[in-house]
Every structure is written in C-alpha cells, then in structure tokens.
C-alpha cells in the first residue's frame, strides 16, 4: 500500500501509540515498522508514514504536514 | 569561469595589436575591467570585422559574401580572463555598460582535455589516492581514524571483502549500526555492492576508523526494481545517528557521515514552492535533520551527484541545478569528483546548488581501481567514491580533533580554505574551492595546535 510521509506536532514524550490515539489513526493506516521518528523532539516534531487516505484526511489538520518522500539512489557507478 | 572579452580600443591600439611581432599585453588593452582577472599570459588578438563584399549588403548578416577587415578603425581585440562563477551573469551584462570599449563577453570552454566519463578505464589506483591524500603524513601525525565513528549510509558493508582487498582488519561498530525496518542482515555482512565500495574508500585515509553500517538503500519500496530506498528511511537513520552522537561525551564527540546517494529526478518530489517540497526546501524534515546533526557536531558529507554536463548519468532528470536537497545543504560538504590526475570527471555535477548556491564545496578523488566491488577491472567511480574518500580524510582529522576543539563548521571552513584551487579566482562551480589537500590541512592543524599551546 502506498505510504506518505507526514510530520506531526505532539508532546515531547509522545510514542507511536499515543500519537495514533491523538491523531485518530488506526493501526492499518500507519507504517508501524517505521514508527514515530523524532525530527526535533524538543519542539515535539515527529515523522510518520501513513496510508494515502489517512494522509489526505489529516492534510487539513494544523497538527500534520505532508512532505515528499522521493526515492534515493546510489550515485555510482555512472550509467 | 574563463571568458573571452572583445573590445574596441583606440585605432592606434588596434593597429599595434594587429602588427605582427607586436609585444602588447592584455593589460595594455584591457587593464581595469571590473570583476575580470586578466590572463596576462595570453597576448591580445586582433579580430577582423566582417563587411559585406558587395555594396548595399546587409551589415549585420553573416550569410552573404564577406570581406574581413583588420583596418584599425574596424577591427576589434580579444583578451582572455576569468570571472567568478557566482558573478558571471551580472558581470556579463554590466561590463559593456560600464566600459564603452567592451563589445561583448564570450564563454571560453576548455577544448584541450577529454574528461573521464562513466565506462572509462580506471585512472590510477587506490594506492595513488593514498599518496595524494598523504596518508603516511597523516599517520605520522596520529591521524588514522582511531576511535572515530564513521557512518556509511548506503547499501550495507561487506567487511570481509574490504579486508581482503586492503589486507587489513576492518573495524565495524555493530552496536551503533542500524537498519531500516524490513532490512535483514548483520552489520558488516551485507552483499558486496555500492556500500562496500564506499566503506573501502573511507578507509584509504582513515584505516582505523570504526565503521557504522547504515544500509538505508536496501529498503525496497513497493514496485521498485533498482537498488534504492526512500528519503523517509534516511530520516529514520539520521534520528538513530543523532542518538549515537548524543551518547558520546561532549568533550570527545566525533561522528562522520558519508552519503553517496541522492534523488535523480524531481518526478517524485512536490514542486519547488510547495511546503512539502524536498529539493529546494530547507524546512523539509530530512534537511532539518541534517542541519540539527551538523549543529550537534556531526561532519556530514554528500556526493554532489553524477549529472555533470559532459557525460551525465542517464537517470539525471533535473532540467538544471542537479545538486538538490541535502546534497546542497549549507551545513554539509558537497563533494565533486576528480580523477587521480586532478581533472574533474565529466559526470561530476556542477553548481549552483539548490539549498545553497556555492555547491559543490570541494573535490576529491574518484574513478580509480580500488575496492573491486563491481568487478576486478571496474573502478570505484561516481561522486559516490569521491564522497567517502573525503569523509575518510575528515575522519582522520577527527582522530585528534573532536568537535569540541574543532567544530563541524570550522572543519568545513578548513577543508575549503586549504583546498587546492583549480581556477584562477577561487571558487568555481566545477571544483568548488578545489581539491582536498591533506598537506594544507596538516599544516593548518599544526598552526592551530601551536596557537592553543
């Protein structure tokens, strides 16, 4: 299932389950293997990967922002 | 950038330039051109004026019978010089306005060299690179990477392969290594591939560094057929590396992060200006992570990319300015590639960068026979090899200079300031500030140590 990268603002001691509760996300909408990744924990900024439909639903929320998640590839050998 | 400046000086000067055996210099004709460093070894050349061969011909057309006049009132003169890359557009438009004798400014592209391209044979080998990096001198200063964590963010490392080629033990820090979810395998024991090449190349200058294996490019996205990952995997990797850094005592903190990867195409990105964009947006979460790690003391190096004008990788899809996203981050070093002859390889991406204009920062060696990760006869190539070569040099410096005594910012400045300048006027978009120069770094560190004593 396609995933989108979002950043969310939560309390500094948030974990994945508290984030899902606070954001109204079901387990099958979240890439739990990826988890809740701290970007700037002091500011309460975290990253998550969620399904496209969850991302769309949250896109109007002031607590969440969608970001591009492009593929990254090795720079060599030149083809 | 090298340029040719066409001028129409006084008829007397034109006549003197056009006279065979004349000994006029560029300064006699064009002294004081603002922003132009004249090449004083290049004698001014008289250029004839094309005139219609028949009365009534169009004076502006070159598509008709022509006569060429070297008469002093009609001919012009060309001199050679150089304009800083980041001033080129303003200087080219301002020069004819500020000097009435300037007619035009033209590019003067190099025509004498054939640059190394992908698929070409190796140029030298890794022992040449070790010599160019003055590895013996570094070791004599105690700068061999001992105790320095050197993260290779790539496809995973095969330590046994690296050890078999170098003939030395390889230190893999398994405790501090990390894999994205879904990636199986043990640190230092991944298949021989791109990451093994990068690890090998870091160890040329820092043979005793502790490799931290971060195989983010093994995280396959759905439907992908090539070796790649997602930028979100790199975000998670950097969150892990921030923990590695913060767990170190502040007084001896050192973490070098080598990144020989990037995004080839804007296809999967939001457009510039969109708040979620990556390529041009310092507020993208990965770019924030790079900035925060650098601020905390990590030395972060990115390959500039393989989208150089002369022989670009076929995957390059940015219409211009291919050094994008974190590869152009102001708090990271963007590394261009030169061969062991010191010539830029034709695939090495040129600036300006997207997040920061002055990219690449520096150049390092690539396209040499090294790890053999892609076959015994295949070179370690791409800016993929140049980046870890430079990262190894940084790790060597960190052996005795942790970030508490030489901040990441100071070390970036040191590398730029000591680089062997490849142009006449400092910074340029091909080589950055120049080719890394270990001798200059050692000398600067000695001066710094003497001052601190």
Image (cartoon, rainbow, N blue to C red):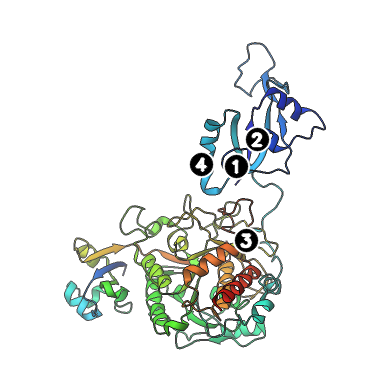
Q: Name the residue that disc number 3 marks.
A: B118
Asked whether the residues under marks 3 and 2 belong to the same chain, the reply is yes
Which x, y percent locates residue B292?
38, 70
Q: Name the residue that disc number 2 marks.
A: B30
Q: Check the residue under mark 2 and report the chain it is in.
A: B
Residue B136 in the figure: left or right of residue B156: right
Sequence-wise, which precedes: disc 4 or disc 3? 4
User: In whole angstroms, how far apart are the C-alphas of marks 4 and 1?
Assistant: 13 Å
Q: Nearer the viewer, mark 3 or mark 2?
A: 2
Task: Say whether marks 1 and 2 touch (CB < 8 Å).
Answer: yes
Asked whether the residues under marks 3 and 1 belong to the same chain, the reply is yes
The answer, for residue A75, to whether it is visible in the render is no
| Tag 2 secondary structure | helix
Sequence-wise, which precedes: disc 1 or disc 2? 2
Task: Say whether marks 4 and 3 touch (CB < 8 Å).
Answer: no
Q: Nearer the viewer, mark 4 or mark 2?
A: 2
- Residue B36, labelled with which disc? 1
Q: Check the residue under mark 4 and report the chain it is in.
A: B
Sequence-wise, which precedes: disc 3 or disc 2? 2
User: In whole angstroms, how far apart are the C-alphas of marks 4 and 3?
Assistant: 31 Å
Residue drawn at 67 percent across, 81 percent down: B140
Q: Name the residue that disc number 4 marks.
A: B89
């Amino acid at each position: 299932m396609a995933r989108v990268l979002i950043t969310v603002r939560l309390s500094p001691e948030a974990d994945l389950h508290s984030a899902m509760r606070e954001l109204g996300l079901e387990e099958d909408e979240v890439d739990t293997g990826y988890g809740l990744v701290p970007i700037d924990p002091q500011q309460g900024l975290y990253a998550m990967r969620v399904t496209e439909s969850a991302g769309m639903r949250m896109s109007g929320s002031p607590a969440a922002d969608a970001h591009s998640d492009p593929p990254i590839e090795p720079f060599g050998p030149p083809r | 950038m090298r340029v040719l400046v066409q001028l129409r000086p006084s008829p007397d000067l034109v006549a003197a330039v056009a006279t065979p055996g004349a000994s006029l210099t560029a300064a006699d004709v064009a002294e004081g051109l603002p922003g132009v460093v004249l090449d004083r070894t290049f004698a001014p050349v008289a250029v004839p004026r094309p005139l219609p061969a028949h009365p009534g011909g169009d004076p502006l057309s070159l598509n008709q019978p022509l006569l060429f006049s070297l008469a002093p009132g009609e001919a012009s003169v060309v001199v050679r010089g150089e304009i800083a890359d980041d001033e080129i557009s303003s200087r080219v438009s301002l020069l004819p306005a500020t000097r009435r004798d300037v007619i035009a400014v033209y590019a003067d592209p190099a025509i004498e060299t054939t640059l190394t391209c992908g698929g070409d044979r190796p140029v030298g080998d890794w022992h040449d690179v070790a010599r160019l990096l003055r590895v013996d001198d570094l070791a004599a200063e105690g700068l061999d990477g001992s105790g320095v964590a050197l993260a290779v963010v790539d496809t995973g490392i095969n330590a046994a392969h690296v050890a078999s080629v170098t003939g030395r033990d390889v230190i893999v820090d398994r405790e501090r290594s990390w894999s994205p979810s879904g990636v199986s395998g043990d640190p230092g024991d991944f298949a021989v591939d791109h990451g093994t090449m990068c690890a090998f190349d870091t160890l040329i200058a820092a043979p005793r560094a502790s490799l931290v294996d971060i195989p983010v490019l093994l995280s396959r996205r759905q439907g992908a057929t090539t070796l790649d990952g997602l930028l979100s995997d790199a975000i998670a990797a950097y969150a892990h590396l921030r923990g590695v850094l913060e767990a170190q005592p502040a007084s001896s903190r050192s973490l070098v992060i080598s990144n020989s990867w990037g995004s080839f195409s804007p296809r999967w990105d939001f457009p510039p200006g969109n708040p979620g964009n990556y390529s041009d947006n310092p507020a993208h979460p990965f770019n924030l992570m790079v900035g925060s790690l650098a601020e905390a003391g990590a030395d972060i190096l990115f390959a500039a990319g393989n989208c150089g004008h002369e022989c670009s990788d076929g995957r390059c899809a940015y219409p211009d300015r291919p050094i994008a996203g974190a590869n152009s981050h102001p708090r990271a070093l963007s590394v261009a590639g030169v061969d062991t002859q010191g010539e830029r390889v034709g695939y090495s991406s040129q600036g300006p960068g997207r997040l920061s204009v002055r990219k690449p920062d520096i150049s390092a060696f690539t396209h040499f026979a090294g790890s053999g990760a892609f076959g015994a006869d295949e070179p370690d190539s791409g800016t993929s090899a140049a980046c870890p070569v430079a990262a190894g040099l940084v790790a060597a410096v960190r052996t005795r200079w942790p970030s508490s005594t030489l901040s990441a910012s100071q070390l970036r400045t040191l590398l730029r300031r000591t680089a062997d300048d490849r142009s006449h006027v400092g910074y340029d978009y091909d080589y950055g500030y120049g080719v890394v120069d270990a001798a200059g770094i050692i000398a600067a560190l000695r001066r710094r140590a003497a001052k601190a004593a």
